[in-house]
Amino acid sequence: MKEKLRKPSHVFPLPVTIVGALVDGKPNFITLAWNGVVDYGVLSISVGKTRHTLKGIQQTGVFSVNIPSTNLIAETDYCGTVSGKDVDKSRVFKVFYGELKDAPMIEECPVTMECKVLHSYEYPTHYLFAGEIVATYAERDIFTGDTIDPRKLCPFFFTTTDMSYYHLGERIARGWEPGKKYKK
């Protein structure tokens, strides 16, 4: 039997990303696990109203989404526990720019995306941004053939149930295969 939880819960596990934005012309990064796919080529991020990075996204209308590997756990956690108002988080990483000149990206992250804000939605504690992915950059060594191999990418996830990070496990099936047995 299922048990009703005390309060609404989040979808979990949540993929961990590092979002970048220029705040008053200076690169800043924030760790976010509140993100997702909206449509082909469009993703969403949810940024708290008190976060320093919010100001940069609102100033420039662009942001980056950087997917860290497990070898960046300390840097990723750090960016989520200190404010860019107080420390220069751009010194934690090598910063680069792509087509959008105002979306700082992280060289050490194996996958980075630069996004242009399409829509902004205000909620009581957060802003939700839907961003068009303008360009995606990936390290060649995380590919198997012509495809990014998630095992080589080594992404990690956050769970709100125990406030912990977890890494990706083994593949258990290929998509659109196991359900075929019900199509007979």
Image: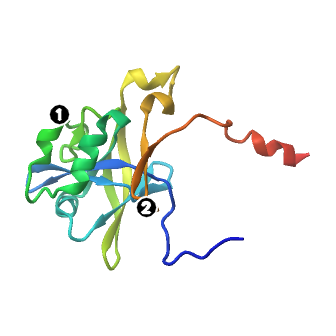
Q: Residues within 10 Å of mark 1 (few under 14, many from 20)?
A: few
Q: Position of residue 179 (x, y in %)?
A: 78, 46
Q: Quadrant of residue 83?
A: bottom left
Is residue 14 toward the left or the right of residue 80 in the image?
right
Name the amino acid type tagged 1: Lys
Q: In which quarter of the image is the C terminus?
A: top right
Q: Position of residue 55 (x, y in %)?
A: 17, 63
Identify the element where label 2 is drawn.
loop
Is residue 142 toward the left or the right of residue 32 in the image?
right
Is residue 8 toward the left or the right of residue 44 in the image?
right
Pointer 1 residue: 94
Q: In this orientation, does residue 168 appear?
A: yes
Q: Where is residue 96 in the image (x, y as percent from the top left)?
A: 19, 35
Instruction: Identify the residue at horizontal 39%, vertical 22% (top origin).
Output: 140
Residue 160 circle label = 2
Identify the element where label 1 is drawn.
loop
Q: Considering only order in the chain, which callout, 2 or 1, is on the residue closer to the N terminus?
A: 1
